[in-house]
Amino acid sequence: MNKSIRDDFPILSRSVYGRPLVYLDNAATTQKPRQVVEAIADEYYNVNANVHRGVHFLSQQATDLHEQSRETVRRFINAHSTNEIIFTRGTTESINLLARTLAQYDSNTGEVGEVIVSQMEHHSNIVPWQLNGFKLRVIPMSDEGVLDIDAYQKLFSPQTRMVSVTHVSNVMGVINPVEEITRIAHEHGVPVLIDGAQSTPHMTVDMQALGCDFFAFSGHKIYGPTGIGVFYGKEEWLDKLPPYQGGGEMIKNVSFEHTTFNELPYKFEAGTPDYVGSHALAVALDYVSQIGMEVIHQHEAELTTYAVQQMQTIPGIRIYGNSQHSTVNCQLSSAGPVSFNVEGIHHLDLGTLLDRLGIAVRTGHHCAEPLMHRLGVEGTVRISFGLYNTIDEIDTFIAGLRRVIQMF
């Protein structure tokens, strides 16, 4: 990436502990370009008014920006209609929305529904299903992070209500074969949710090509603001599911005896939406679209490949999942997170000492405790790249890693 892109991110020029910041925690959240921050400030200063139903100029202008943002999202993920784009607070709320409404939809069956997930899921794709009474069936994986598709096909039963899998592992960077997973589920008449939190910032996501019934991603992981995200659902499914929350906007008529609900997508958007956040998210999506998702993917692939190659020269290091391995069933990402441990050094100690060198990494279980159990570790150190990272920053990280290891 050229220097002008890095200049769009003022935080990258700051120092930490007297050293230039090297930010390698992009899987947790990305930094924001000045265009996004300025869009937030501009709307609050010049266009702030509650959206929908307002007859005055500011309300209509804010409403236009909000609904134009919905169209931007639709175009970015290639959905059929803006009716299929629901604004939420992020991937977590999106999955909670589906788990809650599907449980309500099934409430009259009297049966315990089952949801198929993978062994590498984030807690956000585990706990909501459990909270709403679903039993989880788990797709096993190999040591390299390859899902066992044969075992997956045997998990279906008459009680299977959903397949819900991550597109890209937030720990190992594995790209799961979601098209194949979706095809198999549909053969069994089962809908599919894809957690796109870690894929959407790094590659083109196309709802028509993926074929999934539901998809979720978070704005803050794709250079947008926090507290805004997207829940995509095929219109035929969203029509069937009941509302998620009650209040203003999601209603058509209300009396003390009976309430009728609004049309899509507003049926799922109770209360005042984050109309400033939706506009800022659209600005972020336009920003990455202008650069080009293929350009971003290629840049991050080069960074990840280089980082893994350099890390593999360090004695005692173990990298989890992210390698040159590939199979028919699963391709390991060359542009996702890289998780590792160093023999004899606790991951928290390693991350803390790297931080003192100005290098921001993530440590811990990464909200994926079942995966940590599968890998036989308590946690890992994780580095992850964004469109603004550079080879020089990887060299700084490698030098810092060697220095910390020498201390032990």
Image: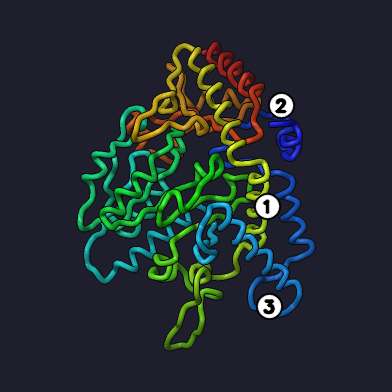
Question: In what element is the residue under mark 2?
Answer: strand
Residue ID for mark 3: 54
Q: Which label's residue is closer to the chain start, 3 or 2?
A: 2
- Quadrant, the N terminus: top right
Between 374 and 390, the residue placed more toward the observer is 390
Q: Amino acid at mark 2?
A: Pro
* Residue 226 x, y percent position in the rendering: 60, 51
Between 290 and 21, the residue placed more toward the observer is 290
Q: Amino acid at mark 1?
A: Val
Residue ID for mark 2: 20
Question: In what element is the residue under mark 1?
Answer: helix
Q: Which label's residue is closer to the chain start, 1 or 2?
A: 2
- Which numbered mark, 1 or 3, is in the foreground of this view? 1
196 sits left or right of 19 in the view: left
Residue ID for mark 1: 283
Residue drawn where x is 52% and y is 61% of the image: 85
How far apart are the alpha carbons under marks 1 and 2?
Answer: 28 Å
In the image, residue 206 sits, relative to residue 395, either above or below, namely: below
242 sits left or right of 158 in the view: right
